[in-house]
């Protein structure tokens, strides 16, 4: 076995031993929704390129939050994929995108944002320190709970619904994105 293969296997074993079963973005560009997420770009600049986040980007724009999420931050965003929005009851997304529902849409979206740069290690440490579940105040004002789900992380909303974190540590110039498979409800 050559030295490179040995290093890759050892690195993989270290990741497994640390409980990093959730897909981990690591350093440098990460592919999300068919696009490279470049760490020198901000959250919005990267998200607009992801084919898996078209609904989220449309919602951020309709809510008037694009400028905020392009700001200095740092922000930790739990970003639902398009399939997560598709699981909402029929007509929900369309209703939320109507201009008269902008305040409600802002509330929903800012519930997916936690102030600070909470990478996977910081989330894991908080969960471990708090016996398996850590609560974080969102920009919206209510709390989300991050917990271990086997070797992965999940996020639970105020109603007890949970989303699996499917990709962690997508680095941004103004924070970090963790991709989730469900929409969280305040």
Image: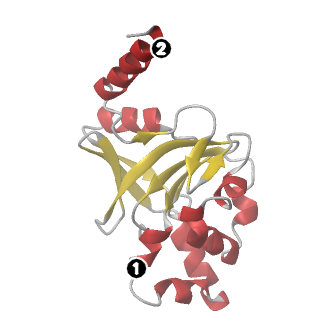
Which residue is disc 2 drawn over? Answer: 4
Res 186 seen here: no
Helix, strand or loop for disc 2: helix
Q: Nearer the viewer, mark 1 or mark 2?
A: 2
Q: Which residue is pictured at 43% across the width and 68% down the height? A: 183
Can you give x and y, in whole percent of width and height, for residue 93 in the image?
51, 83
Quarter of the picture containing the N terminus is top left
What is the quadrant of residue 64 in the picture?
A: bottom right
Packing grade of label 1 (10 A; few <14, some 14-19, many >=20) is few
Q: Which residue is pictured at 37% across the width and 16% down the height? A: 10
Distance of label 1 from label 2 (alpha carbons): 45 Å
The one of 133 and 61 positioned closer to us in this rendering: 61
Can you give x and y, in whole percent of width and height, for residue 12 in the image?
37, 25
- Please say if 109 is above or below 135: below
The one of 86 and 185 positioned closer to us in this rendering: 86
Left or right: where 75 falls relative to 153: right
Helix, strand or loop for disc 1: loop
Residue 88, label in figure: 1
Question: Which residue occupies the extreme front position in the image?
Answer: 1
Can you give x and y, in whole percent of width and height, for residue 91 in the image?
47, 90
- Please say if 137 is above or below 5: below
Residue 182, label in figure: none
Q: Which residue is pictured at 58% across the width and 42% down the height? A: 30
């Amino acid at each position: 076995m050559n030295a490179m293969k040995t290093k890759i296997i050892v690195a993989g074993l270290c990741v497994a031993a640390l409980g990093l079963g959730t897909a981990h973005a690591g350093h440098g560009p990460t592919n999300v929704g068919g696009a490279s997420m470049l760490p020198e770009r901000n959250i919005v600049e990267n998200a607009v390129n992801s084919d898996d986040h078209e609904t989220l980007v449309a919602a951020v724009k309709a809510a008037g939050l694009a400028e905020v999420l392009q700001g200095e931050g740092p922000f930790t965003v739990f970003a639902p994929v398009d399939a997560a929005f598709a699981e909402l009851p029929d007509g929900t997304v369309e209703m939320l995108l109507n201009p008269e529902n902008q305040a409600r849409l802002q509330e929903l979206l800012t519930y997916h944002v936690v102030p600070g740069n909470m990478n996977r290690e910081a989330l894991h440490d908080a969960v471990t320190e708090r016996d398996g579940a850590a609560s974080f105040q969102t920009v919206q004002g209510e709390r989300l709970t991050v917990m271990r789900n086997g070797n992965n992380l999940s996020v639970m909303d105020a109603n007890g619904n949970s989303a699996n974190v499917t990709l962690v540590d997508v680095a941004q110039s103004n924070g970090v994105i963790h991709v989730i498979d469900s929409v969280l409800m305040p």
